[in-house]
Amino acid sequence: MDCEDIKVPEEFSDICPYDDKDFHKEMSLLVEEPGFEHAVRFVMPDVDYKAFCGQLLQIQNKHDFQMQIMLPFLKKLEKDTTKGITAGGMENIIDNTPNVYMSNHRDIVLDASFLNLCLTLHGKPTTEIAIGNNLLIYHWISSLVRLNKSFIVKRDNSKRQALEAAQHLSGYIRFAIAQKRQSIWIAQRQGRTKDSDDRTQESLIKMLALAGNTGDFVGSIAQLNIMPVSISYEYDPNDYLKAKEFLLRKKDPDFKKSQQDDLISMETGLLQNKGHLHYHFCPCINEQLKGIPGDCDKNEAARHICNIIDKAIHSNYFIYKNNYIAYDIINGGTRFADRYSTEDKQHFVEYINSQIGKLNISPGDTDDLEYVKHMMLVMYGNPLTNQLIAKGIAN
């Protein structure tokens, strides 16, 4: 049975992707939104908006929307803003077995979008995408993502509401995997890892187990077929904005980003240069879960599971020249000097300085300049540092 033939229980109607029977109605409302028109014209400056809307209104379901609209858009984005996207480990994906694809998190929009592009180009079904409601700044954004197979993660709740939302989300994810036979993508932690020190959140693993029906924490996780995915960007377009956030938090520990900050990050990530990107699909963790001692309590078991996921992601980063250069600069050595040339190093240092230049920090603020430069080098050095540790190589 096709997953779209499975009726989603009413209890999940507030967070799940739109049903195909509602697709045309919701799309008809979306194309009338001024904010949606502005966004389309921003990312596709040459668009004939009226003709584009006509094309959208001819589409009747999420699959056709992804194949007819999103696939060409993502291919163009790959061509215009990257040096190419490659994928490894596709042999680890077993046909007709739904997975929870869990990856490190670099970009608000593109991590999952390009993952689905990789899957599509390799003849695999796309995933449903977990997206935090903090990013759904306008109603039309919520409508758009639910038309594009996304489901909503409710955040910023009270303690009681947070537990209810976690149980609700866990129930939907388990329904998607077990009943719809639909793979999902979820980041390994809430929010992007600003310094590229990617670590799986224990609370995320505990959330995934909440709706389990085995009476066994590890067994409940095994039912979800978690497949770690390691994402590697040669250049992170938001690196200087992440460094700025570190600086602002250093000056004010209570600093919180605004919705406008998130919009700027989304736009920057979409349209600016990313260099080469690589996705590696690691084996499903179920075999490794069998090695977790049976007498572990939930907290200890969750830590074991996080470590399994982290080691897979860290081991399978694609390491770029930038990572080797940043590692050597941070450590004041030349350990990996054979992996890059003097020109490569000069080019990377110039890139870092040009990104810092976008922050408009006064030349006299030497402490601030040195701090953001250090944090940017940390962002590019950490993937290599973590890979060396994951592979048992002396760091």
Image (spheres, rainbow, N blue to C red):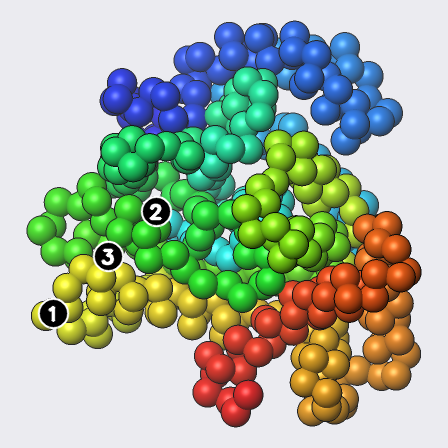
State which quadrant residue 318 falls in: bottom right
Tell me whether circle 2 and circle 1 mark residues in contact (CB < 8 Å): no
Query: Residue at 50% of width from left, 71% of height from top?
Result: 314
Residue at the spot of label 3: 222
* Disc 3/disc 1 C-alpha distance (Å): 14 Å
Q: Name the amino acid, label 1.
A: Gly
**Sequence-first tag of 2 and 1:** 2
Residue 75 visible in the current orientation: no
Say the numbered circle drawn on residue 228: none
Give the image location of residue 378, x and y in percent.
65, 70
Residue at the spot of label 2: 98
Say the numbered circle drawn on residue 294: 1
**Sequence-first tag of 3 and 2:** 2
Query: Residue at 56% of width from left, 52% of height from top?
Result: 253
Give the quadrant of the N terminus.
top left
Per the image, label 1 sits on a secondary structure element best described as: loop
Tell me whether circle 3 and circle 1 mark residues in contact (CB < 8 Å): no
How packed mark 1 is, by other alpha carbons closer than 10 Å (few <14, some 14-19, many 20 or more), is few
* Disc 3/disc 2 C-alpha distance (Å): 12 Å
* Disc 2/disc 1 C-alpha distance (Å): 26 Å
Give the image location of residue 106, x and y in percent.
60, 53
Give the image location of residue 283, x and y in percent.
39, 65
